[in-house]
Structures are given as C-alpha cells and as structure tokens.
Amino acid sequence: MDARSHSHKKTKVTFECTPEEKTYIKMLAAKSNQTLGEFVLSYIREDFPSKGKVPNQTTMQAHKDALNGKGTSYHSMDDFWEEMGVTPSAEP
C-alpha cells in the first residue's frame, strides 16, 4: 500500500459495476501491478484531506463566517440538498 496510508486499520468498501467494467478494472490494475483497492485508491487518494495542507483563503473565510453565525442555514436536509442541486440516493 502507498506510504501515504494513515492508518493500519482497514475496512472493506464495495461498489457495483457491470461484469465488463469489473474485468476492465482488473486488467488495468494488473497492468499497473496493483491490487484492485490500490488501483482505485490511486485515483481518489489525491483528493483526500491531508495534514499540512492549508485551506485556500475562500475556504478559510467561509469557515470563519460559519463560526461567527454567518452563512446559509436550511430548515431541513431536503432544503439543503435542493440548494446543492443534489438528489440524495440514500434515505436515513
């Protein structure tokens, strides 16, 4: 596993795809000499938050505003998702 792995604890993640997609992903992983997990994580790990990264000025200002009670509030999660333009796929 990559040296950037922060924990020795592991958990299993599953996702659905077609048999053809699975075969293709396995071929790409093998070509890269990686396990399926290593291969998939190699594409998304760069977007993980990491220690030492400093948020940009816009993010810092939004955080400061939120701490001071400014910003947007929503009456419900449905209102939030609607504002974000997202249709939630899972029910609580």
Image (cartoon, grey):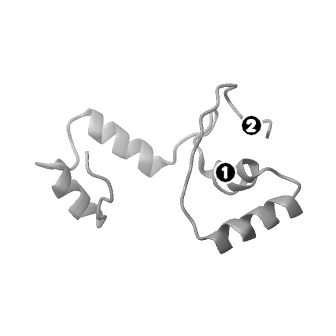
Type of amino acid at the residue the image marks with label 1: Glu
* Mark 1 or mark 2: whose residue is earlier in sequence: 2
Q: Which residue bears the numbered disc 2?
A: 4
Q: Which image quadrant is residue 43 in? A: bottom right
Measured from the top left, where is residue 28 in percent x and y? Answer: 80, 66
Question: What x and y, as percent, mark residue 40?
Answer: 68, 55
> What residue is at 75 percent from the left and 48 percent from the top?
38
Residue at the image position 79 percent from the left and 50 percent from the top: 35
The residue lying toward the viewer, choosing from 1 and 20, is 20
Quarter occupied by residue 48: top right
Secondary structure, mark 1, is: helix
Which residue lies most toward the top here? 8
- Under circle 2, the secondary element is loop
Q: Is residue 12 above or below residue 38?
A: above
In the drawing, what numbered circle is on residue 86?
none
Residue 2 found in image quarter: top right
What amino acid does circle 2 point to? Answer: Arg
Which residue corresponds to the image point at 68% horizontal and 50% vertical from the top-left? Answer: 41
Q: Is residue 31 left or right of residue 87?
A: right
Q: Nearer the viewer, residue 15 or 2?
A: 15
Residue at the spot of label 1: 46
Rounded to the nearest angstrom, the CA distance separating label 1 from label 2 is: 10 Å
Q: Which residue occupies the extreme front position in the image?
A: 19
